[in-house]
Image (cartoon, rainbow, N blue to C red):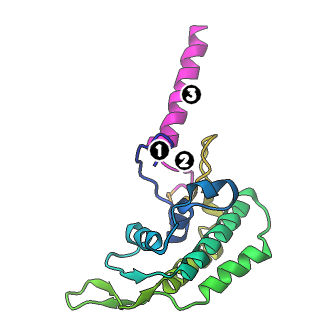
Amino acid sequence: MSRDGRAYRFDAGALCMELLTTGGPGEFARYEVLREPADLARWADRSRLPAGLEVAVTEGELAQTRAFRDALFQLAADRVAGRAPNAGHLAVVNAAAAGAPLAARVEADGSRGWVPGATGAGLLATVARDAVELLTGPYADRIRECGAHNCRLLFVDTSRPGRRRWCAMEHCGNRHKVRAHRARRAEADD
């Protein structure tokens, strides 16, 4: 959702980066949406994970997921800014990735399903392993912050040319283009 309540499509580019839109450290705590275990289960339903996951989440798993999210947020922001990663944040991500991930299975109809008994810990391990793949893989240098002056959403630029600037073209990109157009018109009118 935008600040004015309008919905827009935002492709974070990776499963782990989708988690960053649920809140975050410091000033981003005001956007917190993972307030109870059911909120994390709802996030998993809306994420890029294949449908059909029924996950049971405990309060402790929710707290671990928020701590992981905040550490990943800092690591991604450090990557964007060209700063060295913080050892404490790396430890949080690596500890989460060491857990047992969710287990997929092939259903009788040939579709993908999930092994019953999925937990918040398994969900966290799955997301953390995705983060490890992102931070060590070919898209690590394509982690970006939205180019709008008042938007700090982080995403992975998976576009072919690697020049994505906005969280969503129809939101921040369009506002930038409108401002630029108005500035050109004002300049031409002078």
Where does residue 124 sit, x and y in percent of width and height? 54, 80
Q: Report whether 181 appears left or right of 132.
A: left
Above or below 86: residue 12 = above
Which residue is the site of mark 3? 180
Residue 133 appears in view: no
- Which labelled disc corresponds to residue 155? none
* Magenta-colored span: 161-190
Where does residue 36 sit, x and y in percent of width and height? 49, 71
Q: Nearer the viewer, residue 19 or 32?
A: 32
Q: Nearer the viewer, residue 40 or 123?
A: 40
State the image quarter where residue 111 is shown. Answer: bottom left
Which residue is the site of mark 1? 169
Q: Are marks 1 and 2 in contact (CB under 8 Å)?
A: yes
Q: Main secondary structure of the magenta part?
A: helix
The amino acid beneath tag 2 is Trp
Which residue is the site of mark 2? 166
- Closer to the chain start, of discs 3 and 1, is 1
The amino acid beneath tag 3 is Ala
